[in-house]
Structures are given as structure tokens and as C-alpha cells.
């Protein structure tokens, strides 16, 4: 198993949301296509922003 960090969240050439993971050595990247709601939740956390209300997954 490889330990990875989130490199970033963005869009591919078809405008689908992608999260890019990077291993700790920085040698490999792993793109994972995710839904727009999941991408937004990850982006909010990466920015350090706090929404006015908890998001659904925070409540669970």
C-alpha cells in the first residue's frame, strides 16, 4: 500500500471532476474521477474554508 496525499482537484478535458493523488516520494500521480459534490467537499477542505452549515457527510 502506498501513502498518498491530495495534489489537487480539477477537471479533465471532458469537464469531469478529477482528484489527483500523489505519493510521498512525488514520483507517481493517480487521477481518480469523482462526482461534482464530492469534488466540492474536498476542495472546501483543501482551502480551509468552513461552510455556514455542516455538509451531509459531516453530520453522519
Image (cartoon, helix red, strand yellow):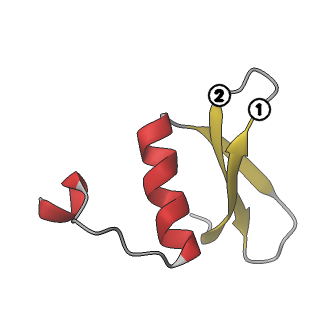
Question: Do residues under tags 1 and 2 come within 8 Å of each other at their CB atoms?
Answer: yes
Could you say which quadrant of the image residue 7 lies in? bottom right
Disc ID at residue 41: none
Label 2, secondary structure: give it: loop
Question: Looking at the image, which residue is at 43% across and 56% down?
Answer: 41
Q: Position of residue 37 (x, y in %)?
A: 42, 41
Q: Quadrant of the N terminus?
A: bottom right
- Horizontal placement of 39 versus 56: left or right? right
**How many marks overall?**
2
Q: In the picture shown, does residue 51 fall above or below 14?
A: below
- Viewer-proximal residue among 16 and 1: 16
Question: Looking at the image, which residue is at 65% across and 41% down?
Answer: 18
- Horizontal placement of 4 versus 54: left or right? right
Q: Which residue is mark 2?
A: 16
- Viewer-proximal residue among 20 and 29: 20
Q: In the picture shown, does residue 40 fall above or below 49?
A: above
Q: Quadrant of the C terminus?
A: bottom left
Label 1, secondary structure: give it: loop
Question: Looking at the image, which residue is at 51% across and 79% down?
Answer: 48
Q: Within 10 angstroms of label 1, few (less than 14), some, or many (20 or more) residues?
A: few
**Mark 1 to mark 2: distance in Å?**
6 Å
Residue found farthest to the front: 52
Q: Position of residue 34 (x, y in %)?
A: 52, 37
- Horizontal placement of 23 versus 34: left or right? right
Q: Which residue is mark 1?
A: 12
Q: Within 10 angstroms of label 2, few (less than 14), some, or many (20 or more) residues?
A: few
Could you say which quadrant of the image residue 13 lies in? top right
Question: Looking at the image, which residue is at 70% across and 46% down?
Answer: 10
Q: In the picture shown, does residue 30 fall above or below 49?
A: above
Q: Position of residue 56 (x, y in %)?
A: 20, 53
- Viewer-proximal residue among 25 and 51: 51
Residue found farthest to the right: 27
Amino acid at each position: 500500500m502506498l501513502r498518498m496525499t491530495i495534489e489537487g482537484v480539477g477537471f479533465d478535458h471532458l469537464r469531469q471532476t478529477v482528484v489527483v493523488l500523489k505519493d510521498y516520494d512525488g514520483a507517481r500521480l493517480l487521477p481518480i474521477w469523482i462526482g461534482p459534490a464530492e469534488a466540492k467537499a474536498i476542495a472546501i477542505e483543501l482551502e480551509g474554508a468552513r461552510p455556514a452549515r455542516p455538509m451531509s457527510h459531516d453530520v453522519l
